Image: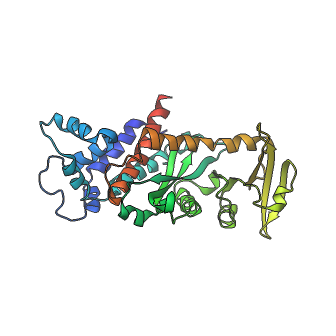
Amino acid sequence: MLSLAIAVAISASIVRAASTLNESRFKPQYFTRKRILPFEDLLRYLLSMHKTSSQSALNKFLERRGMTMSQQALSKARSKFDHSPFLKLFNGVRDAFYGAKYLPTLRKFHDKFLVAIDGSETPLPNLPALLEKFGGTGAKASSPTARMSIAYDVLNDFIIDAAFSPLTVSERDHAKEHIENVGKIIDMKDSIFIMDRGYPSRELIDLLSERSYYLFRLRSKFSTEIDALPLGSHIITMYDDVKVRIVKFTLPSGEVETLMSNLFDLDESEFKDLYFKRWRIEVKYDVVKNKLEMPCFGGFSENVIMQDFWISMYLANMAAIAKNEAD
């Protein structure tokens, strides 16, 4: 697998690249004068800061230089460039992780990657501009909230693709985007996409049927024909011409679990464990939200929120590389 040392070297080259600054600053004159925090150092600080005590972290970062900087000055500096440096870091490390050199070393299930897709709502600072941009939840839909979504390699503990959007973009819309983007990184025929009850639809089934493999958990009443099937494995035709496999089994709670897939050659006994591998994406959301404190945004603008989102995605993968190496 990709080592932490190489991932750090890739990151350093992206941070130092002139194109990273030139393509992200909003005006050509930004970051051209000598500053307390030059652009490269600013990026390094934002990747290392502890969000719940940002002024303290900033002071410690500058202490060895014998300098100080206010939170207001930091916010002003952040407003001069977009989130693209952190997206570049995420993409650069991701592309290396799945590069030809390391691809054979990655964990698979029957020679296939297991890619779980799931979304989550993220509360935002309570500002009218953010409510207008992203939409709201709660009483009278008045609490600004965004939708985030990730495509996650559950066996290699790695976020392959991520999205952050207004609530008007549905989880299924994100899933379609993830599937297309994952297909640019790894061969679609080498992937099994695993999704929960909110995702099954004709559009996604059609998208995946001929190109890849999928495993959906179905809600009750998704199909009266499927509800009527007994426990076990069944091959049926849906939407007039799409052949699918339905696997039904009883959980310890007594509830009947129903799965839909196009894995026609997989032994029926493996489906239960295969689906429950999806649980690791829930653990990853816990890491992003609680350990990396992603909802504790370092500012109140859409720009800073997008910066913090991609910082969190990048750091989650760097932490996973470190953990894989330690293991």
Visible in this render: residue 128? yes
Q: Position of residue 70 (x, y in %)?
A: 18, 46
Say which of 167 and 11 sits in front.
Answer: 167
Q: In the picture, residue 206 is in which quadrant? A: bottom right
Residue at horizontal 41 percent and vertical 48 percent from the top: 295
Q: Residue extending furthest front?
A: 139
Q: In this view, does 56 lie to the left or right of 125?
A: left
Q: Where is residue 195 in the image (x, y as percent from the top left)?
A: 64, 52
Residue at horizontal 54 percent and vertical 61 percent from the top: 174
Q: Position of residue 202 (x, y in %)?
A: 69, 66
Say which of 114 and 211 sits in front.
Answer: 114
Q: Residue extending furthest bottom?
A: 240
Number of marks present in the image shown: 0
Residue at horizontal 51 percent and vertical 44 percent from the top: 285
Q: Which colour scheme is used?
A: rainbow
Q: In the picture, residue 227 is in which quadrant? A: bottom right
Visible in this render: residue 157? no
Q: In this view, does 235 lie to the left or right of 324?
A: right
Q: In this view, does 254 lie to the left or right of 145?
A: right
Q: Residue extending furthest top?
A: 327
Q: Where is residue 158 in the image (x, y as percent from the top left)?
A: 51, 44
Residue at horizontal 74 percent and vertical 44 percent from the top: 271
